[in-house]
Image (spheres, rainbow, N blue to C red):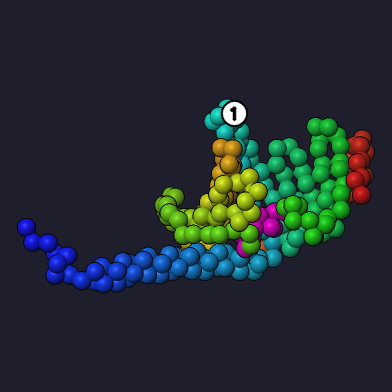
Amino acid sequence: MINMTTFIPKSFFRISLLCLFACISITGTAQDQKAKDLLNQVTAKIKSYETIVIDFKYALNNSKENINQESKGNVTMKGNMYVLNLMGVTKLFDGKKTYTINPEDEEITISKYNEKDESMITPSKMLTFFNSGYKFAWDIAQNNKGRKIQYIKLIPINTKDQRKEILLGIDIQTKNIYNVIEMGKNGTKTTLTVNSFKTNQPVSKNQFTFTESKYPNYYINKLD
């Protein structure tokens, strides 16, 4: 049997390996750039809307803990102001204060908004949360009833983050977010799926105004 290494210099193998690694690196960089470009397009689209109205489904699952919950909700946004309805609770933010209205307990909690507090998440932030704090990569694409959904995988940079990874599904045609899937390190999976995404809808003048007189029997809990 002929030993091919007798005829092919070792330097050839080293050069071939270097070329292979270089190609892999270039491909990975190109994919990362594609992911970044798509995320930038999503952010630009979100910022271009005057108002956004979303109906969504929220699901939380953990097979180890035997947890399986689903709930529908909706949110109306204008700038950083919003009205969010989820699990029977309404949360209203007028740009300065957050009002959490709980009809079951007949209680309203009022708190000031601290823009520097990164732990305070608003619906508008949820639509652009991916702009910082994550490594990202181009992931799978799926066909959902004729819509192409491209997924971007997000890995939190902060090692203390309890989320292992996040899959952000983006409608390629509209550049709007279709769903967000979070995988926790404890096995918990949360999924937010957009059922309807309407933009530039007319909203009431008092849409984001809290009127205390509407809740005469409620206990008002002012935290600030």
In the displayed image of the protein, which residue is found farthest to the top? 66
Secondary structure under the numbered disc 1 in the rendered image: loop
Q: Which residue is mark 1?
A: 65
Location of residue 179 with respect to 80 vertically, above or below: above
Q: Position of residue 191 (x, y in %)?
A: 57, 44
Q: Badge 1 local density, few (<14 within 10 Å), some, or many (20+)? A: few
Return the residue nearer the eye: 88 or 166. Answer: 166
Q: In this rendering, is residue 143 above or below 221?
A: below
Residue 112 in the figure: left or right of residue 147: right
Q: Position of residue 184 (x, y in %)?
A: 59, 42
Closer to the camera in the image, 218 or 163: 163
Q: Quadrant of the N terminus?
A: bottom left
Visible residue check, residue 204 = no
Residue 85 at x, y percent in the picture: 72, 44
Q: Nearer the viewer, residue 149 or 132?
A: 132
Amino acid on which disc 1 is placed: Glu
Q: Residue at x 69, y 57 (%)?
A: 125
- Indicate whether residue 133 is drawn in magenta: no
The span picked out in magenta is: 122-131
Please provide percent x and percent y for residue 97.
Answer: 85, 54
Q: Residue furthest left?
A: 1
Which residue is found at the position 53% from the left and 63% from the top? 175
